[in-house]
Amino acid sequence: MNTRSFVPAFRGACVLLAVLPGLATGRVAADGSGGGQGGRLADLAAQILTCSVHPCLGQTEKDVRTALHDAIVSDEVSCYSDLRVAYPSVRGHLQGVVEWDFGGTLDAINLMVIDFPVESSEFLDQLELALPGCEMERDSDGLNAWSCSVDRQDAEDADVFVYVAPGLVILEIDP
């Protein structure tokens, strides 16, 4: 037997055996990140805060409309888009609506995610891991609401607010 062809095949089988259980339970995403829907939403929040995905904070309304090919509706108070259209990386994993808050530039982004089966404590842990300096604190009014401040390099810190109800999470990113 040729050992040169056996070693790569053996390594590949070991990697497959290590990854398959995670794929079966939804703990390893196809793109390599873990955490299922909660992890994807936490990663998206981190990408928005670092502008490694667009639209991101600070862009003009014209830039956002151009990036989304005008897939935005407005009620004359706020602007809205389908989450999967605004951020294609979550397509097939998250669904909901993005609310854009423009005040000359994109001042705040609210992600309203439906069909969100993740426990709030698990999701809050994932956010704290993904967002630098974030230490979630429950709001004192007893509602299912939490907030934290996030350290941003080369930009002012941002506040992140989380509101949770069964099957729904609202994640507000507001510098």
Image: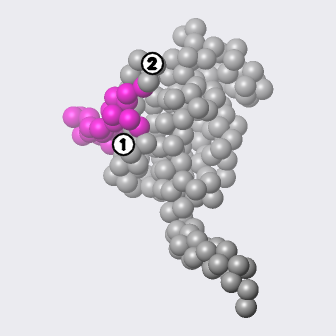
Q: Considering the image in quadrants, where does the N terminus appear?
A: bottom right
**Residue 75 in view here:** no
Residue bearing the label numbered 1: 128
Seen as rendered, the residue at the extreme bottom is 1
- Residue 67 % position (x, y): 73, 25
Side of 83 relative to 36 (left or right): right
What's the mark number on residue 155?
A: 2
- Name the residue at the left extreme: 140
Q: Secondary structure at mark 2?
A: loop
Question: Which of 24 and 99 lies nearest the eye of the viewer?
Answer: 24
Q: Main secondary structure of the magenta part?
A: loop
Quadrant of the rendered image containing residue 145: top left
Residue 134 visible (yes or no): yes
Determine crowd level at label 2: few under 14, some 14-19, many 20+ residues with C-alpha closer than 10 A: few
Mark 2 or mark 1: whose residue is earlier in sequence: 1
Span colored in magenta? 131-152
Does the segment drawn in magenta span residue 137?
yes
Query: Which residue is found at the position 66% from the left and 34% from the top?
Result: 86
From the image, which quarter does the C terminus lie in? top left
In the image, farthest residue toward the top: 104
Q: What x and y, as percent, mark residue 28?
A: 54, 61
Mark 2 or 1: the one toward you: 2
Viewer-proximal residue, 86 or 11?
11
